[in-house]
Image (tube, rainbow, N blue to C red):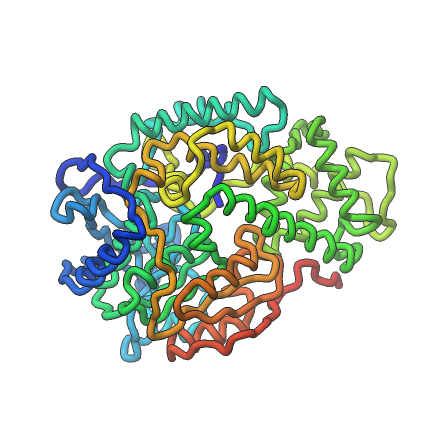
Amino acid sequence: MLRIPTLAAALAGAFALLTGTAVTASAAPLTPLTALTALTTTSATADLKVDPVSWTPCNPDPTKPDPKIYDCAVYPVPLDYAHPSGAKIGIAMMRRRAGDPARRIGSLFLNPGGPGGSGYLWATTTRFDPEVQARFDLVGFDPRGVARSNPLQCFTSNEDADAVFNRMTGVPVTPAEITGTLAATKDYTDACARNAGALLPHMSTMNVVRDLDRMRRAVGDAKLTFAGFSYGTLIGATYANMYPDKVRAVIVDGNVDPQLRLSNGLEYDRQRATGGFEVSLAEYLKRCSAAGAPRCAFAGGDTRARFDAIRDHLRTSPVTLPDGSTVTLSTFTSQVSNALYSQSRQAPLARSLQALDQVIHPQQSVSPSVAPLSPSEASALAVAAPAALREAPADTPYTADDSYYGVNCEDKPYPSNPLVFAFAARAWELTAPTFGRYQAFDAPACATWPAPARQVERYTGPWNRHTANPVMVIGNTFDPATQYKFAQNMQRELGSAVLVTVDMIEHCAVGKSKALNALVTSYLVDQTAPAPGQLLKPDADPFPATS
């Protein structure tokens, strides 16, 4: 999940509007009374003929020899589906051709999440088994407004963006920090109103799904095969309900709760903080202590109390390291959050925590099993975690895009008073002392977004339409960004779904467990739904034994 202060450093390319003129009118939001009519119309249009994709051979990495198995395209879709013959935008697509053309099943569309994540290069992913790569074209794409696909951009230069973003504090605590952050956020959304253009009111997931269905038809697939991760699970769930008779196989991994997300953005975010990030952090510290030093460098003493002491110290007193870098509460929280997303980052996080603790408390020797660490190992905590999933080349004066808020603010309804987020921060940190304030200040932009959820066309349900093949839902027991409860809710809300669980602290699971991947391959290739109730283990240990 991306946050405003890191967006300006993200790399994103630009495609202009392909044809036509700007369409400015936005449709009315879907209501329960109009949902059935909309679904009926959607089902009827799902069979209409569209132009095929015009693929051109391409090399995903021009710095390396061309493997000659990839093709690229920019596929035109309507800017506004209320005017399908009007202005068009281009969806950037890449495919990895099936390794065994004689046994090819079709295309496997992929979305990595975000929202705002670039999926273009996901055609090159190796997280699936070789049999999947042999039987499917792997198709990655940048959704509308993202990276190469007509990026939604609120600024005309990086300098203008920095002038706004640099006034924000990731985890504001003092009245001055809070006031400054909210004022800068209003300047940000004002810039979006001035600069984002005709695409601005057409960024909801409903439109992304309409684009996906057009691409399905354009590659010649009678039904959709799809794998969505994180926010991509909302794309999968929405597709399964807008086009239930066009579903072949849909995998959703690292799940949102569709019903909650689309009905109450603030409560959804609160549950992410309390039931996702905070619970995952507690488990991380518990497993660190159980692993012991030197496997987990931060083990020794009461890891929970030591962590809390570091966090509370940073709340009032940033720490300047010998190299001149400074660890703040914002950079610290950002890096801890980032590490919880992946087991591979969790042992390094422990070393950074231990090194920082030694700087703050130089006289303490908590664990004789760990040699004193260099203060330089704490420097990783002195920078905010970078924005992820942005692979597009920087070829415009403003090298980021603002699709994260474009989607979130048009999908998730929020209060229109920015001060609500400051009050929420104070309340949430009582039960989520590390991530409550951090999460509360993720979405103030949605209070003043120029095209908020209450004014745009978006899909809010029903979520229980039946698909011939059950949707495969995957949830990790300690997923920080999308708590396990959300996976359980996704399985329950969908009309036909089966849940597979993986016991690990990580966001998303495909490619992290051979046992899971075997189920994924069987589901995608043979359409065999996994048996319900399975609890699997990851292949790796976040704190591997040292030799």
Is residue 142 visible in the rendered structure shown here? no
Quadrant position of residue 48: bottom left
- 495, above or below 280, in the image: below
The C terminus, quarter of image: bottom right
- 17, above or below 287, in the image: above
**Rendering coords of residue 324 (x, y %):** 67, 27
- Disc tally is 0
* Identity of the residue furthest to the front in this view: 33
Q: Is residue 327 left or right of residue 53?
A: right
Q: Nearer the viewer, residue 439 or 119?
A: 439
**Rendering coords of residue 341 (x, y %):** 57, 52
- Residue at x 72%, y 29% (from the top left corner): 322
**Rendering coords of residue 375 (x, y %):** 74, 37
Q: Nearer the viewer, residue 252 or 544?
A: 252
Q: Nearer the viewer, residue 333 or 542?
A: 333
- Residue at x 37%, y 32% (from the top left corner): 449
- Residue at x 33%, y 40% (from the top left corner): 13
Is residue 315 visible in the rendered structure shown here? yes
Q: Is residue 492 left or right of residue 190?
A: right
